[in-house]
Image (cartoon, rainbow, N blue to C red):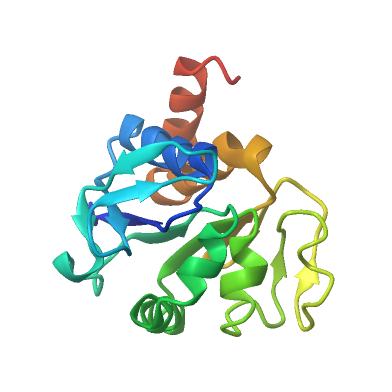
Amino acid sequence: MKTSFVFLADGFEEVEALTSVDVMRRAGMPVVTVSINEDQVVTGAHGVQVVADSLYSDNDYSGAEWLVLPGGMPGATNLASHEDLCRQLVSQDECGGKVAAICASPSVVLAQLGILNGRTAVCYPGMEADVEGVKWGDSAVAVDDNIVTGNGPAAAAPFALQLVAQSCGAEVADQVAAGMLLS
């Protein structure tokens, strides 16, 4: 199975990032956390420090299963300011690769890159107000072809389980959910 990458920037939403990593790893998916900082220590929006598995420059993203963006502020803004990451996200989408974003990241990162143009997506309520060209939904999680979006921290588990379902099948996602007492 291909490796998925979860990108961490100072100000990331801890619940969204770590739930995604945890759920995907429970499903047996290889997942690497990636710091876009100059070192591997990344501080979340609520002061939780995480040591990422790698730095951005350490990885080859060309064969990635998923590129995953947690939300949080200013985490999403920090992700959006990383030019190499933004180029990689556009490239991943252009070749039909899987991209996932939750909370502020769908509007602050993906929509600003044009990745969500004409697609259905969700984001943290209110973050969609100034974004045009996207069909904003009101569910917790939205799937549009190769793009999965989530609306916030409460959607972290359903969001992550959708990534598992897309890669490993609904049966594996259901098993992981049952093991976590989510179903």
Q: Residue at x 37, y 39 (%)?
A: 49
- Left or right? Give the position of 40 relative to 134: left
- The image shows residue 165, relative to residue 82, as above or below, that is above
- The image shows residue 174, relative to residue 77, as above or below, that is above
Identify the residue at the far left of this view: 58
- Left or right? Give the position of 62 relative to 162: left
- Left or right? Give the position of 17 relative to 59: right
Q: Residue at x 44, y 55 (%)?
A: 10
- Left or right? Give the position of 118 relative to 14: right
Q: Residue at x 38, y 59 (%)?
A: 66
**At which x and y percent is residue 168?**
38, 44
- The image shows residue 100, relative to residue 24, as above or below, that is below
Q: Residue at x 41, y 32 (%)?
A: 172
**At which x and y percent is residue 155?**
65, 40
**At which x and y percent is residue 179?**
45, 16
Taking depth in this image into account, of 100 and 39 the one nearest to the observer is 39
- The image shows residue 114, relative to residue 75, as above or below, that is below
To which quarter of the image does residue 63 belong?
bottom left
Q: How many marks?
A: 0
Identify the residue at the far front of this view: 47
Taking depth in this image into account, of 13 and 176 the one nearest to the observer is 13
Q: Where, quadrant-wise, is the C terminus in this rendering?
A: top right
**At which x and y percent is residue 110?**
57, 73
Taking depth in this image into account, of 169 and 125 the one nearest to the observer is 125
